[in-house]
Image (cartoon, rainbow, N blue to C red):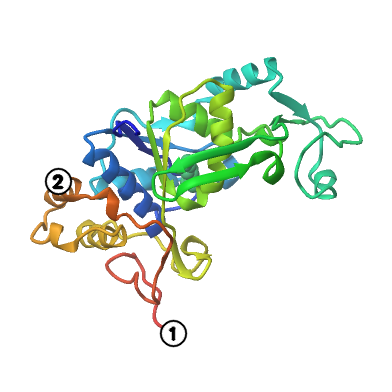
Amino acid sequence: MTSPLSCGRFAPSPTGLLHPGSLLAAFGSWLLARHHHGLWRLRIEDIDPPRTVPGAAHAQLQALAAFGLAHDGPVLWQSERGDAYQQALDRLLASGQAFICHCSRSELAARGGIHHRCVARQPRPDPAVRFRVPAGSEVQFDDGLRGRQVQDVHAEVGDFVLRRADGCWAYQLAVVVDDAAQGVTDVVRGADLLDSTARQILLQQALRLAVPQYWHLPLLLDAPGHKLSKSLAALPVDSARPVPVLRQLWGLLGQSPAALEGHDDLHDLLAAARQAFDPARLPRTDILLPTGALSAPMLQNPPSPT
Ligand code: GLU
C-alpha cells in the first residue's frame, strides 16, 4: 500500500502560455495534493534557453495565481540549480554510471538512433555526458492511474543524455534532482511524460533517491492520437474568467459537476473542489474532445468556426 500523498508539484517549462492541457495537469496535481492535505510545490523548468520564451514563466505564474492554484514555499527556478545538477553528475561519473560521449547525432542515427556503445570516429570539443543503461535494465512501476508499466530502458532508450553537447542540463537529470530536493512524494503530470518515468527511476536508484509515486493524467486530444498542444486549439486559457474554466476542467477530470454547483466565488469553488475531489473518478485514458468543446470560456481567443 502506498503512503498518503504529502507533497505534489507542478513543473512547467516556460515555452509559452498555459494551454488547457497544461492547466488540466496543474489542477489535477493541485487537487490530488490538497485533497490529501499535502503540500504543492512549483518549479519553473527553464534549463533549455533555446526553447524558453521570454516572459512566459511570469505569465504562467500569473495565470496560476489567477486560477487560485497557490503553491507552498518559494518557486524553484532550474536555471539557478546548476551546482546541484553538477554534484549529481559528478557522483554518477565517479561511480562509472555516467560517461563522456563524443558520438554525433548522425553517427547514432546510422545505428538506429539508440546509444549502446560509443561509435564516435573522432573526439569533439563539446562532448555530451550520458547515463549508462546496461542490458537487462527493465524498470517496472505502478502508475496511480495507468497501472503497471514496464520498460526495457536498454532496448527502447539506450544510454541517455544527462548533459547535452551544448552544455545544457538534460530534463531527466534536472527533474530527478529537483523532485528529491523539493521533497515531492507524488509526481502528477501529463501522460506525455509516461515514457520518461523509467529513465527517472533508474536515475533515482543510481543516486539513491526515493522513488515517488507517479500519476499520469490524461492528455487532451482533438483527433485520435493528436495532442491538443500541437494544434490550433492549443491557445492560452482565459485567466480572466477562472471559475467557468475550472468547472470545465473539473468535468474533464471525471469529477461530479454537482459538487461545484452554487460555488461561484473562486476560493469558495476551490475549497469545495478539494473536499469533493475523488481520485477514483480520474480518467485513465486520454480524452478525445469533440470539435469546439474548448470554446469560450476556456480560451482567450477561440478559433472562429470555419
Ligand atoms: N517541464 C515539463 C513540461 O512542461 C514537465 C516536467 C514534469 O512534470 O516532470 O512538459
Q: Is residue 13 visible?
A: no
Q: Residue at x 55, y 25 (%)?
A: 205
Which residue is denoted by mark 2 in the rendering?
271
Residue 95, quarter of the rendered image: top right
Which residue reaches farthest right?
121
Q: Position of residue 87 (x, y in %)?
A: 58, 17
Residue 176 position (above or below residue 53):
above
Which residue is denoted by mark 1 in the rendering?
306
Question: Between disc 1 and disc 2, whose residue precedes?
Answer: 2
Residue 249, disc? none
Q: Quadrant of the C terminus?
A: bottom left
Q: Residue at x 38, y 26 (%)?
A: 183
Which residue reaches farthest bottom?
306
Element at label 2 = helix
Q: Quadrant of the N terminus?
A: top left
Q: Nearer the viewer, residue 4 or 64?
A: 4
* Kind of residue at disc 2: Ala
Q: Residue at x 54, y 39 (%)?
A: 140
Q: Nearer the viewer, residue 231 or 285?
A: 285
